Image (spheres, rainbow, N blue to C red):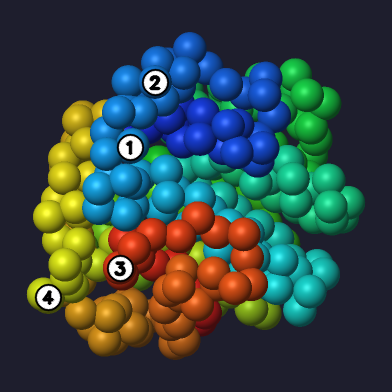
């Protein structure tokens, strides 16, 4: 699997984080600025006409994952975090500032990981407890998940893995071996958690046309295919349970409108956040 084109979208999401005060302004890139301005007319149409756009669900998923990570750290102060396909995500920097003892490992393809480390050093955030590591989770070599876990994590402490804005670029059959491997790796720890986003295309969903339009935009930006994995929320938990995750919760942004400062959309939210445990 060649996942290099997906890193291109990191520039756009990085610009969204910066524009919304979630990221260091120094992490904006020329590519991110260009994409942000180029997509603004489409984002405006989506928000005004159909009630939701890419920026809406980017912020919804990011802030809900933040909330769930805070909850996990309240339960497990010794928690270790691995954010896969980190791109220009500002989450590691923000959480390490708030939790001084937190081990937060970011991971991405080698070029993006090197770029992220330069940015971390630029703002004085790079350390042995917060760095970016090279990873290609489709590989079974020194760049694979197993090697990263074995080299950098303490099996005596809980671990939580995050993938944000990644899995929708691959088909379920392609991802299944990765998820099965991840669930087995997490079982080495006292507690193992996994947070990710998902975009179910539900039967008879009035947002179906919007979802298909947005997937086309994302596919154009990322130069890849965008996949909708489930047509029913009830199908999500059994799928991941078969891959080794014993507990699966599906978080709907609508349930958080009153608790978190989320942008809202009309109708059903386009994104859901999945919380899993082994």
Which label lies toward us, 4 or 3? 3
Q: Count residues near mark 3 (Cα–Cα under 10 Å), then give few for <14, some for 14-19, many for 20+.
A: few
At horizontal 39% and vertical 20% (from top left) the residue drawn is: 37
- Secondary structure under tag 1 reads helix
| Along the line of sight, the residue nearer the viewer: 199 or 118 | 199
Label at residue 37: 2
Screen quadrant of the N terminus: top left
Question: Viewed as shown, does residue 76 lie left or right of 193?
Answer: right
Mark closest to the chain's N terminus, 1 or 2: 2
Mark closest to the chain's N terminus, 4 or 1: 1
- Callout 1 touching callout 3 (CB < 8 Å): no
At horizontal 78% and vertical 24% (from top left) the residue drawn is: 123
Which label lies toward us, 2 or 4? 2
Q: Is residue 95 above or below residue 198?
A: above
Judged from this view, the residue extending furthest toward the top is 30
At horizontal 42% and vertical 78% (from top left) the residue drawn is: 250
Mark closest to the chain's N terminus, 1 or 3: 1
Residue bearing the label numbered 3: 267
Residue 43, quarter of picture:
top left
Residue bearing the label numbered 1: 43
Q: Count residues near mark 4 (Cα–Cα under 10 Å), then give few for <14, some for 14-19, many for 20+.
A: few
Judged from this view, the residue extending furthest toward the front is 48
How far apart, in angstroms, are the residues tagged by discs 1 and 3? 17 Å
Mark closest to the chain's N terminus, 3 or 2: 2
| Along the line of sight, the residue nearer the viewer: 8 or 34 | 34
Label at residue 203: 4
Q: Count residues near mark 1 (Cα–Cα under 10 Å), then give few for <14, some for 14-19, many for 20+.
A: some
């Amino acid at each position: 699997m060649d996942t290099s084109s997906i890193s291109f979208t990191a520039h756009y999401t990085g610009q969204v984080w910066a524009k919304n005060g979630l990221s260091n302004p120094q992490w904006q890139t020329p590519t991110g600025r260009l994409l942000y301005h180029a997509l603004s007319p489409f984002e405006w149409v989506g928000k005004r006409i159909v009630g939701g756009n890419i920026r809406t669900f980017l912020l919804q998923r990011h802030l809900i994952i933040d909330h769930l990570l805070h909850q996990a750290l309240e339960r497990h102060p010794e928690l270790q975090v691995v954010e896969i396909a980190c791109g220009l995500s500002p989450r590691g920097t923000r959480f390490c500032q708030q939790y001084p003892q937190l081990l937060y490992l970011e991971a991405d393809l080698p070029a993006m990981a090197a770029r992220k480390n330069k940015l971390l050093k630029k703002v004085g955030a790079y350390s042995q407890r917060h760095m970016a590591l090279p990873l290609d989770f489709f590989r079974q070599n020194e760049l694979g998940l197993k090697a990263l876990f074995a080299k950098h994590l303490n099996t005596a402490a809980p671990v939580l893995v995050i993938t944000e804005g990644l899995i929708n670029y691959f088909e379920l059959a392609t991802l299944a071996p990765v998820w099965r491997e991840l669930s087995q790796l997490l079982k080495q720890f006292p507690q193992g958690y996994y947070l990710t986003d998902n975009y179910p295309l539900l039967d008879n969903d009035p947002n179906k046309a919007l979802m298909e339009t947005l997937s086309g935009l994302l596919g154009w930006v990322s130069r890849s295919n965008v996949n909708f994995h489930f047509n029913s929320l009830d199908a999500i938990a059994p799928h991941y349970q078969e891959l080794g995750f014993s507990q699966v919760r599906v978080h709907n942004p609508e349930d958080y409108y009153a608790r978190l400062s989320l942008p809202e959309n009309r109708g059903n939210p386009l994104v859901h956040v999945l919380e899993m445990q082994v």
